[in-house]
Image (cartoon, helix red, strand yellow):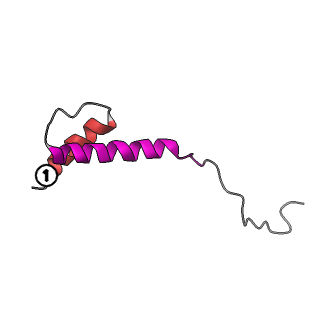
Amino acid sequence: MSLSSYRMHRIYLAATMNYGLGSDDPEEFAYYNKIRKEMDDMKKEPVKKGIPLINWDTPKGIDK
């Protein structure tokens, strides 16, 4: 049996807000762990900020 969209949303909210699942259903528990793993992986990746300055060509009359 697959999870309904309502149940998936409830599990997603519980996982993102760091709440416990409160269910013994293995399918719900697997989905909860999947969301938590994705969140942990995102925290490990560095966030790239700013504007990359690669391939910026300024016209010749502007910088004078």
> Is residue 30 shown in magenta?
yes
Foreground of the two, 20 or 9: 20
Q: Residue 13's spot in the image, x, y percent?
A: 27, 39
Considering every residue shown, the one lying at the far left of the view is 1
Who is closer to the viewer here, 54 or 17? 17
Instruction: State which quadrant residue 1 falls in.
Output: bottom left
Residue drawn at (17%, 52%) of the image = 5
| Three-letter amino acid code of the residue under disc 1 | Ser
Q: In the rendered view of the protein, which quadrant contains the C terminus?
A: bottom right
Tag 1 secondary structure:
loop
Disc 1 packing (10 Å; few <14; some 14–19; many ≥20): few
- Residue under the point 53% across and 47% down: 45
User: Which residue has dot 1 on it?
Assistant: 4
Relative vertical location of residue 54 with respect to residue 50 in this rendering, above or below: below
Name the residue: 57% across, 45% down.
Answer: 46
Q: Is residue 11 left or right of residue 4?
A: right
Give above or below for 20 relative to 35: above
- Residue 12: x %, y % from top left: 27, 43
Q: Determine the main secondary structure of the stretch shown in magenta.
A: helix
- As drawn, the residue found furthest toward the right would be 64
Left or right: 35 as drawn, with respect to 50: left
Q: How many marks?
A: 1
Residue 44 x, y percent position in the rendering? 51, 43
In the rendering, at what x and y percent does residue 42 appear?
46, 46
Q: Residue at x 73, y 65 (%)?
A: 56
Q: Nearer the viewer, residue 16 or 59?
A: 16
- Residue 39 lies in the magenta stretch: yes
Task: Left or right? Give the position of 5 relative to 45.
Answer: left
Residue range corresponding to the magenta coloring: 26-48
